[in-house]
Amino acid sequence: MTTQQLFEQIRLKQSFLSVGLDVDLNKIPQHLLDTEDPIFEFNKAIIDATHDLAVAYKPNTAFFEAYGLKGWHSLEKTIKYLNDKHPEVFTIADAKRGDIGNTSAMYAKAFLHDMAFDSITVAPYMGKDSVEPFLAIKDKFTILLALTSNEGAFDFQTKMAGDKELYKQVLETSKTWAGSENLMYVVGATKAEYFTEIRKIIPNSFILVPGVGAQGGSLEEVCKYGMNSQVGLLVNSSRAIIYASNGTDFAEKAREEALKVQQEMNKILLDRQLAKIEL
Ligand SMILES: O=c1ccn([C@@H]2O[C@H](COP(=O)(O)O)[C@@H](O)[C@H]2O)c(=O)[nH]1
């Protein structure tokens, strides 16, 4: 998928919502536990109920890895289902990988080639040679952790590294890497006030923004400081959508929550005159 195709999806759906698939077997409806693959059945129902409201899905691999081989199988089935049934949506493997070059190349093969995700989240701290193997894969995106949504982001990311904060170094340096046109970045919704500075460094890049919903970040503030002329934002919500109910109506309630976010996004796009639907 290209960023132009992603932008077209955003205009068509009037949404820049990413639904996070963070499936915890302790939180899903009881009746699904009797099925052969409860994780996949849960994801399938959530995807079926929300795919017209979301432009992206973000399975966090931790929630699959935690269940061993069965979990990996559920992840494979989930991405295959998305690629087969909804090839228009942008898929994000939230795996936060990154290692020495030959190891990163294996991660890139597993997630971007074999499982055919459109993108993967990658930690930047092992530097250029740990990220370039991901960037080398054509028409795929590497989403680099820049300024994360958690409190611990202040431990290192906002500390001065030379003449500027570390997260700014990450943004600036990463732009010089081979394949940097395939970069997107993670910036937490809880850090909305940083978006103005961030946009000075990466005006045109897409930013994946986790942290609305359960973590309390403000969609309005993120858009105020982070949106560019191509929208440039994928705002993720996981728990607030997928666990809206743990009864048999879970998919319906997830849709209601996704719809609330999509309607707020639609309003923001209209206010910013980015709501022109015809392509
Ligand atoms: O800075 C970051 C990077 C990744 N995440 C991930 O996003 C979702 C958020 O889930 P919610 O339930 O909407 O809080 C989750 O998978 C995190 O691991 C993040 O929150 N912050």
Image (tube, rainbow, N blue to C red):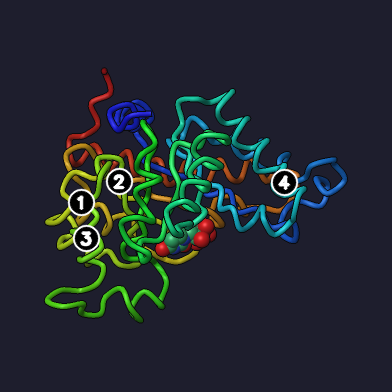
Q: Does any portion of residue 259 appear in the rendered image?
A: yes
Q: Earlier in the sequence, mark 4 or mark 2?
A: 4
Tag of residue 39 = 4
Q: Measure how far apart labels 2 and 1 are at the Cα level.
A: 8 Å
Residue bearing mark 1: 175
Residue that extends furthest to the right in the rendered view of this protein = 34
**The N terminus - image quarter:** top left
Residue shown at the point (56%, 47%) measured from the top left: 59
Q: Measure how far apart labels 4 and 2 are at the Cα level.
A: 30 Å
Q: Nearer the viewer, residue 139 or 102?
A: 102
Of labels 4 and 1, the one closer to you? 1
Q: Earlier in the sequence, mark 4 or mark 1?
A: 4
Q: Position of residue 36 (x, y in %)?
A: 84, 40
Question: Would you place residue 41 above or below residue 101 in this image?
Answer: above
Residue that extends furthest to the top in the rendered view of this protein = 279
Q: Earlier in the sequence, mark 3 or mark 1?
A: 1
Residue bearing mark 3: 195
Q: Measure how far apart labels 4 and 1 are at the Cα level.
A: 37 Å
